[in-house]
Image: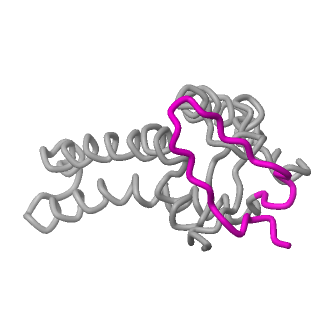
Amino acid sequence: MSAVSDRTVQIKHPGSKEIVLGFSPESVKAPFLLRCGAAIIDYIVFIGIPVIGLLLSRFSGNDGAKLLNEGLSSASWLVAALVGITNIVFLPMFSGQTLGKIATGLRIVRIDGTSPSVGAIAFRQTVGYFLTLASAGIGFVLSVFSSKGRALHDYLSSTVVIYADRRIKR
């Protein structure tokens, strides 16, 4: 039997608790290279906006050092920052996935397999990522050596990134 459940049960009672029986993070952990792929997609989404802004600015006649101080370039960096924050912080709070994780079929869940709270995701995506970056990426590489595939920010927020089937099985 696969690690992904063959059926989905929707809970309709407010205040009821979701329980995932027999969940094993080891059996559905996200491969390290797939997590890297999701991070690269997130980076491309973030950096693509200013690159397009710089190209549009260049094609509209601006040149050289003026490109970095030009209005279109500044606006594209502002839009990139807003899109980046939305993708890295707010989107996972409500869906458990960034755009990169959506594209690669990954999902953030609690270590028991249930959906993490908004606070846990906010902590993971802000403080957890900051500490992972402050460790020069060693916190992320930790997921290679962890049997459960968890990085530093996953340990800090009691979460795990799993490879989740994007299709609903009936």
117, 170: nearer the viewer? 170
Verify whether residue 19 appears in magenta: yes
Q: Image quadrant for the C terminus?
A: bottom right
Q: 135 or 114: nearer the eye?
A: 114
What residue is shown at x 55% (from left), y 47% (from top)? 96
Tell me residue 168's x, y (percent): 57, 69
Q: Main secondary structure of the magenta part?
A: loop
Report the span colored magenta: 1-29
Decide: is 2 above or below 18: below
The percent position of residue 101, horizontal first and vertical second, equals 56, 58
- Identified at 68% across, 35% down, the residue is 132
Residue in view at x 34 percent, y 46 percent: 83
Q: Quadrant of residue 119?
A: top right
Q: Is residue 125 left or right of residue 110?
A: left
Q: Is residue 39 left or right of residue 31?
A: left
Q: Residue at x 62, y 37 (%)?
A: 116
Q: Is residue 14 left or right of residue 27?
A: left
Q: Please give left or right for residue 38 compared with residue 4 in the image.
A: left
In the image, residue 38 lies in the stretch drawn in magenta: no
Residue 3: x, y in percent? 80, 65
Q: How many marks?
A: 0
What residue occupies the far front of the structure in this picture?
A: 13
> Where residue 46 sits in the image (x, y, percent)?
40, 52
Q: Nearer the viewer, residue 165 or 50?
A: 165
Residue 38: quadrant of the picture: bottom right
Q: Which residue extends farthest left?
A: 61
Q: Nearer the viewer, residue 13 or 41?
A: 13
